[in-house]
Image (cartoon, rainbow, N blue to C red):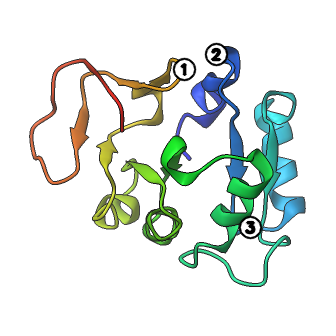
Amino acid sequence: MPRCGRSGARGGNTGVPVAVVSSSSATWVRHHLTRLGLVGRLAFTVTGDDTPRHKPAPDLYLLALRRVGAEAAACLAVEDSPPGVRAAKAAGLRCVAVAGSGAAARGTLGADLVLARLDLLELHGAPARTTAGAKPAGQEAPTRERDELL
């Protein structure tokens, strides 16, 4: 995901558990999390090795919800792919789509919020704060800075 190394685990400093949910193998995920310096900042990871069905099936997110011990309504998914958005929504999560690539931008239908870049999202406890460049799904123009519960 674009700019993940700088802001991907920002919620970790607020007491909000941050996890990675990926259809990729545990080896691939671990390699890239290590490369980005994010391993120690995450509550846990769920990978394609953990469930037989992958995104767009909701199984990986449902496992993450069980591991964190939270209801879907209390959680937020950040996705960069169409199958990921569909998986998060199928699991009952609110979902922010990061439309940094053409493929992701085409697949953001169904996301609750679309961001041009991941670094526009900041977690402060329960609310998600977005900055200029964030667009509620379906809107063309960026909105001004605001706080909202997604």
User: In the image, what residue occupies the spot 61% across and 33% down?
Assistant: 8
Q: Distance between the residues labelled 2 and 3?
A: 27 Å
User: In the image, what residue occupies the spot 87% across and 29% down?
Assistant: 40
Say which mark, if any, is on residue 125. Answer: 1
The disc, 1 or 3, on the residue closer to the chain's N-terminal end is 3
Q: Which corner quadrant of the image does residue 28 belong to?
A: bottom right
Whether tag 1 and tag 3 are in contact, CB under 8 A, the answer is no
Where does label 2 land, which residue? 14
Q: Which amino acid does label 2 sit on?
A: Thr
Label 3: state its secondary structure. loop
The disc, 2 or 1, on the residue closer to the chain's N-terminal end is 2
Q: Which amino acid does label 3 sit on?
A: Ser
Q: Which of marks 2 and 3 is in front?
A: 2
User: In the image, what residue occupies the spot 69% across and 20% down?
Assistant: 15
Label 2: state its secondary structure. helix
Residue 98: x percent and y percent? 41, 47
Whether tag 2 and tag 1 are in contact, CB under 8 A, the answer is yes
Which of 127 and 30 lies nearest the eye of the viewer? 127
Residue 61: x percent and y percent? 64, 62
- Above or below residue 121? Residue 79 is below
Label 1: state its secondary structure. loop
- Above or below residue 90? Residue 130 is above
- Answer few, some or many: residues within 10 Å of disc 3's Cα (few below 14, many 20 plus, some between 14 and 19): some
- Above or below residue 31? Residue 120 is above
Whether tag 2 and tag 3 are in contact, CB under 8 A, the answer is no
Side of 38 where 106 appears, left or right? left
User: In the image, what residue occupies the spot 80% across and 37% down?
Assistant: 43
The disc, 2 or 3, on the residue closer to the chain's N-terminal end is 2
Say which mark, if any, is on residue 24. Answer: 3
Side of 43 where 85 appears, left or right? left
- Quarter of the picture containing the C terminus is top left
Which of 26 and 100 lies nearest the eye of the viewer? 26
